[in-house]
Amino acid sequence: MFDTFKREGFLVGPHKAYQVARDASRVRTLIVSEMQPDFVRRLLLNPVPSLNEALWIALHDLSRGAQIGVMPAANSTIPVTTADH
């Protein structure tokens, strides 16, 4: 397994792709990443160059009392909201 990982690197499996697509279809998802913006758009996500800009966009576009989630380890986190239950 370790040799395969070294050779191929990390690959997003279909389960993670499904989770991201499910969430992105329901909520606006902004991503701050080292990935190239065009690549991020091909993943159907919204690239933002910095956390400050992402927060500004979110705060500017949302109504008063709306909630924002900041997930520093988003690639290894599966969020659960009360609407999921």
Image (cartoon, grey):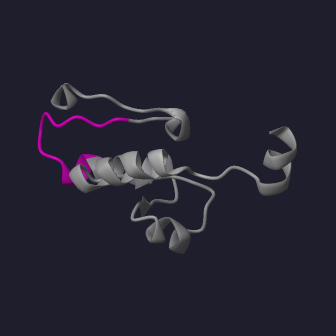
Question: Could you tell whether 80 is left or right of 67 in the image?
Answer: right
Question: Could you tell whether 12 is left or right of 6 in the image?
Answer: left
Closer to the camera in the image, 66 or 85: 85
Compared to 66, does 13 lie above or below?
below
Image quarter where the C terminus lies is: top left
Closer to the camera in the image, 45 or 52: 45
What residue is rendered at 45% in x and 69% in y?
41
Q: Does the magenta run of residues contain 82? A: no
Question: Could you tell whether 34 is left or right of 1 in the image?
Answer: left
Q: Main secondary structure of the magenta part?
A: loop
Closer to the camera in the image, 66 or 28: 28
* Residue lying furthest bottom: 38
What residue is rendered at 36% in x and 31% in y?
79
Residue 15 rendering spot, x and y as whole percentages: 46, 45
What residue is rendered at 13% in x and 33% in y?
65
- Magenta highlight range: 59-69
Compared to 49, does 84 lie above or below?
above
Question: Could you tell whether 33 is left or right of 14 in the image?
Answer: right
Residue 22 rendering spot, x and y as whole percentages: 30, 50
What residue is rendered at 34% in x and 50% in y?
56
Compared to 10, does 79 lie above or below?
above
Count of number-bearing discs: 0
Residue 60 rendering spot, x and y as whole percentages: 23, 52
Residue 12 rendering spot, x and y as whole percentages: 57, 51
Image quarter where the N terminus lies is: top right
